[in-house]
Image (cartoon, grey):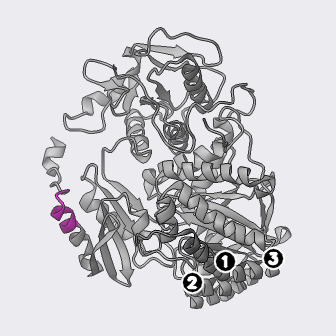
Amino acid sequence: MIFMRYCETPFFYQRRQTREIVIGDPANGGVIIGGNHPVVKQSMLTCDTMDTALSVKQTLELVAVGCQIVRITAPTVKDAANLQNIVAELRKQGCNVPIVADIHFKPDAAMEAVKWVEVVRVNPGNYADSKKFATKEYTDEQYAAELKRIEEKFTPLVLEAKRLKRCLRIGTNHGSLSDRIMNRFGDTPLGMVESALEFAHIARKNDFHNFKFSMKSSNPKVMIECYRLLVARLEKEGADWNYPIHLGVTEAGEGEDGRIKSAIGIGSLLCDGLGDTIRVSLTEDSPREIEVCTDLLAQIPLLTNSKVKIADKDFPFDPFHFEKRETPEIELNENVKCGGEQLIRVVVTRATFDKVAPKIRPKDDVKPEAVYEDLNIFEIDPRRDFEVNCETQLVTVKDGVGLPAITAFRLLAAKLKKLGRNNPILLKDCINFEPVPLEPKIALLRASVVIGTLLADGIGDAILVRGEAGGGQGLRLAYNILQAAGCRSFKTDYVACPSCGRTLFNLQTVTARIKARTEHLKGVKIAIMGCIVNGPGEMADADFGYVGGAPNKINLYVGKTPIKFNIPEAEAVERLVDLIKEHNKWVEPEAKEAVAA
């Protein structure tokens, strides 16, 4: 039984009530986050922090498109000191946007940065703690001694932030937890939460409350679990632990894949009323992140139920540990099965099938697996009582039900659970249609939020995307959502961080080169990391890693183990290909003439 809750009910939208924290001067360009204030959009500079002119230029470009908080990396004391010049020039030009200094390994850099900026972000796994991927058993006394050492390192920053009326962000990242946390809790959502709470206790011990949390991962399902667990733990700690949270999927990548991953992770939590600030991390120019933030936030009122009260408050899923809902295996048609241990299947409408079927080749991975109109399916209005005669009957929510899709499918799963039925469920991205087709970028976000949220809940055995007007694009979108949610792998998967001042190569250019050489490797996961900050740990579930080790030098990883060091950047992509071949993951790309045939 689940005793903790991250929201009051999974069927009704209620925004989590958080304490207000002040960043800068709200009357002069600053912001208040939390409370009833709108969710705040933020992004990060991609240039060298020592380049004052470019830092100012990029900040102004972000503000021009609606960015409300700008983050700048400060890897060294020298970089942190230059924040004074950047902030002074911005204020001189009439730009008062709050600036966040991103600190990882150097407390001295944090102590310098807090003099000049409104917010200092610290990563507990890197800040004053060790990460050598060493296995060690800690006695309670040793663990307590480590906590005391961390308190001695972190307290000066807390006191200075309190004196200067600054804000702190306590931001843990999946993959950059300390050895101490890893050995006691593992690289888990619980470990991330415990790591953050240690630092929060130090802040509160010094009567400092102007801080917020973040829990980032490149895996949307892990990220969702982390934030749910964090909020539940904060509720358990007490009513005055209602600190705001910042949402983001780290290293989401670029293009559709980056947008889909971010929509699944951020959108799911926003739909449950969580989140006070957001960042969409794309391996693209930073202003493009703000457009996605704006579009994503605009969808939340349309995808949530804030009007129809539903008495049932029981969760039809365990929100803190992902587990796919158990269902029997059934036949969709003579060639395809779903449910049980089968893959989550992709269903299309008859109209879409007629459009795309003539273009499908035998070896294509992206293809319709069933036609909606041909299915033996029971369409249910979950608001009303119903009976299902057998568990091998495929079910879905009936079109036109007066509920948003997420609420309706959660309610369907809950009522089936009460009936003791495990029927396979076909998910739909929309059950209530608008009179005009959605813009493709909006259709992508909505489908990703709806289907991705339900998949992260463990609900769904087949999916149907209808909000995307283009048949072929809708089919592709369905597969991309399944890949981003970790449910199917039909192409190469990339974990690519957004650029920042720590990055040791041009991420956009290098990512394009790596994709050009490897995008045919179905089922292979490649991490492309600009520096080592989150590198080894964040790449733990990647097959291979390409990481900036020094200026113009690349380190190559297998999993989180470094294999080759200081490879000249000009050779690194081909050396990565060689490494993939050495581990028998390489296949030659299909000849172009064969593709055209």
Q: Position of residue 157 (x, y in %)?
A: 70, 81
Q: Which residue is mark 1?
A: 151
Q: Position of residue 413 (x, y in %)?
A: 55, 25
Marker disc for residue 165: 3
Q: Where is 420 relative to 186, above or below?
A: above
Visible in this render: residue 210? Answer: yes
Q: Where is 512 relative to 238, above or below?
A: below
Helix, strand or loop at mark 1: helix
Helix, strand or loop at mark 3: loop
Magenta segment: 577-585
User: 411 or 359: nearer the eye?
Assistant: 411
Between marks 2 and 3, how big is the CA–CA gap? 21 Å
Q: Amino acid at mark 2?
A: Lys
User: 196 or 299: nearer the eye?
Assistant: 196
Work out whether mark 2 precedes mark 1 in sequence or the reverse, and give the earlier one.
2
Residue at the spot x=42%, y=29% of the render?
461
Q: Where is 293 relative to 427, above or below?
A: below
Visible in this render: residue 65? Answer: no
Residue 425 lies within the magenta run:
no
Q: Amino acid at mark 1?
A: Glu
Horizontally, residue 529 falls left or right of residue 364, namely right
